[in-house]
Amino acid sequence: MLLFAGLECTSEEVMSRTFHIAIDGPVAAGKGTVSRLVADRLGFLYVDTGAMYRVAALLGIKAGVDLQDESTLVKLVGDANIEMRNPTSQEKDGRLTTVLVDDEDVSWEIRTEKVGQGASIVAAHPKIRQVLVKKQQQIAANQNVIMEGRDITHKVLPQAQLKIYLTGGETIRAKRRHLQLLTKGQDVSFEEVFTQLLERDQRDMNRKTDPLKIIPEDWVIDSSDFLIEQVVELIVGKARVMMGD
């Protein structure tokens, strides 16, 4: 039983009063930027589930834990208080979302390439995924959200009204990722970024637990030939029609 607007409701009743947009797709497909802009346009909460896996990796790295050590990582993540919110006016520094771990702002600390690679490793652990999926579902339980990641449409929010698979060509995605890292002051070659992107794709798609995949209900959008704003317009327009606006 959940509390919604002061009334006790079942999870099914809450779902009928909220609207959920679930977006899956590979790294550097533009999911974060698109989701942030759609959230602003619709007044939704933007939830970056990938940031949660980055937090798990960061916790392990800081503690000097082997990222293959699932049981120790599960305890670290379970004991940590992870919060996520839309950036406040004082946090408009280019971030897409604000991530707090035990009240410490780690929004930029989790965005390094090292943590990103670590996130892909820890995301393969079934028990880590169980812990974080539960947290993600609790966030979405009683509010309108746009949530993006790699298993949102079929695992985290299977009842979402709008399901999207956002993708793009490998070279284009690598160029986007490379530019993003250079903008953040990280000295990395395109070749290195491209190789890591291909490795990340393989890990994400070949996980034994909740692999990245397209499901029949997905609206597949290839962003290769679209501007970000065009993708945003497509999603906002479809969501408003579905909500009856």
Image (spheres, rainbow, N blue to C red):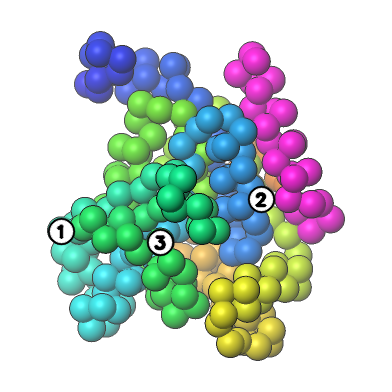
Counting other residues with Cα less than 10 Å from the Cα at mark 2, is it few (<14), some (14-19), or many (20 or more)? many
Classify mark 3: helix, strand or loop: loop
Q: Quadrant of the C terminus?
A: top right
Part of the protein shown in magenta: 223-245
Is the stretch drawn in magenta largely helix, strand or loop? Answer: helix
Q: CA distance from mark 3 to mark 1?
A: 19 Å
Q: Position of residue 150 (x, y in %)?
A: 51, 54
| Left or right, residue 114 beside residue 200 | left
Classify mark 1: helix, strand or loop: helix
Name the residue at 63% across, 47% down. Answer: 34
Q: Quadrant of residue 121?
A: bottom left
Upstream in sequence: badge 2 or badge 1: 1
Q: CA distance from mark 2 to mark 1?
A: 33 Å
Mark number, residue 166: 2
Tell me, yes or no, whether the highlighted magenta stretch contains residue 230: yes
Q: Residue furthest top?
A: 7
Q: Which amino acid type is shown beneath numbered disc 2?
A: Leu
| Left or right, residue 237 beside residue 121 | right
Q: Residue beneath label 3, please? A: 107
In the foreground, 179 or 125? 179
In the foreground, 202 or 234? 234
Q: Which amino acid type is shown beneath numbered disc 1?
A: Asp
Q: Which amino acid type is shown beneath numbered disc 3?
A: Ser
Examine the rendering and report whether any part of residue 44 can be seen. yes
Q: Residue beneath label 1, please? A: 79
